[in-house]
Image: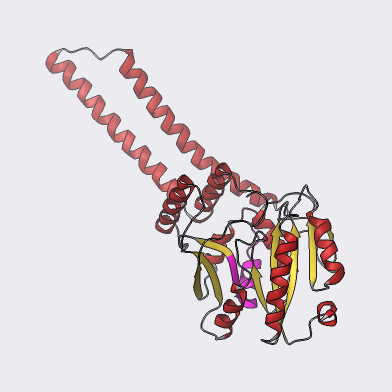
Amino acid sequence: MENQMNSEFSHSVCISVVIPCLNEEETLPRFYNEIHSVGEKMLEKHADIQMIFVDDGSSDHTLNVIKSIRVTDKRVNYLSLSKNFGKDAAIYAGMKAATGDYLVVMDADLQDPPELILGMYDVVLSGNCDCVTARRINREGEPVIRSICARLYYKMIKRISSIDLADGTRDFRLMTRQMAMAILNMTEINRFTKGIFSWVGFKNHWIEYENVERVAGQSKWTFWKLVLYSLEGIFSFSTLPLTLASFGGLLFFAIALLLVGLIIFRTLVYGDPVAGWPSLACIIFTTSGLQLFTIGILGQYLQKTYLETKRRPVFIVKESNISDLDIRG
């Protein structure tokens, strides 16, 4: 068994497992035990597992834990980014480093059950799909408000964009090399990974499972971060906000014309003077607020265009055991 652990890939099929990590020192030992067990079972299917841990600027001992694991298992590889670039950038970095025939993306907190990889591989191997995606069928243990907002968001983004995101969709998936290369060709710095996975197309198969709580540590996704990430998805894959801003301007222009006509009518017919400052102040605040809101929408799209034109790297690698890896993504 020790020889199997320390050997490089001896089978014809290799599955690269990309694991983005941010302050996961508490979860990594247990996660490795489970993914190692899955790797042993994959040997029976004549497939090897290559593990690629991406340390996304952790402030704890995450990288040291990964290095200690690699001492006994050479299938473990790591990338340590120069700072926290975000989970989407970490996934992209891991995918660039992956060399497997198939790629798996999953979290290290065990909310993505590693044993599902076995079933995912069987489905993809059948040739009926290019990707198998995990989907939670419930949100037990999650705050009620957060669950409600998440469900509403998934419904909304399906209606306003060209991507198909089912409620409970996870980043956890197994895909073919062909699909992975299509994703890697999308080099934008403003990355909404769930949307990119959907946008590239290819035939997808859903695999459902019950929600699983984190085994240790705290979630890095606060409610505010989730809101910002949701907006990232909207602005990255939908132009509806721009359309709504345009229609909003037309609507308020029409209302203004009606009010002007009403004032002229009342003045000529009834000799009624124009109402005082309270109504005028309400109108000014309303139109000014709409204008600022519209400018804000334009600013979001302009900001993303500005960042893309600067052509900064998606990530920068500070340290890695993969010698031929480009340190700039």
Q: Is residue 178 left or right of residue 286?
A: right
Q: Which residue lies furthest to the left in this view?
A: 269
Tell me which residue sits at (42%, 55%) in the image.
Answer: 160
Q: How is the image coloured?
A: secondary structure
Q: Image quadrant for the N terminus?
A: bottom right
Q: Quadrant of the C terminus?
A: bottom right
Q: Residue 37 magenta-drawn?
A: no
* Residue 35, percent from left and from top: 70, 71
| Residue 92 locus on image (x, y percent) | 68, 62
- Residue at x 44% of width, y 47% of height: 241
Residue 270 in sight here: yes
Name the foreground residue: 265 vs 279.
Answer: 279
Q: Is residue 36 placed above or below 314 in the rendered structure?
A: below
Residue 173: quarter of image: bottom right
Residue sitting nearer the eye, 245 or 64? 64
Residue that appears at 62% across and 73% down: 115
Label count reads: 0
With respect to residue 125, does 201 lie above or below? above
Q: Can residue 323 be seen in this view?
A: no
Most foreground residue, 256 or 15: 15
> Residue 71 occupies which quadrant of the picture?
bottom right
Q: Is residue 142 above or below residue 290?
A: below
Residue 29 location (% of width, % of height): 75, 62
With 155 as the anchor, is 53 left or right in this view?
Answer: right
> Residue 183: within the magenta?
yes
Query: Residue 59 appears at what percent x and percent y?
Result: 78, 47
Which residues, given as a range, are shown in magenta? 172-190
Front residue of this view, candidates 257 and 295: 295
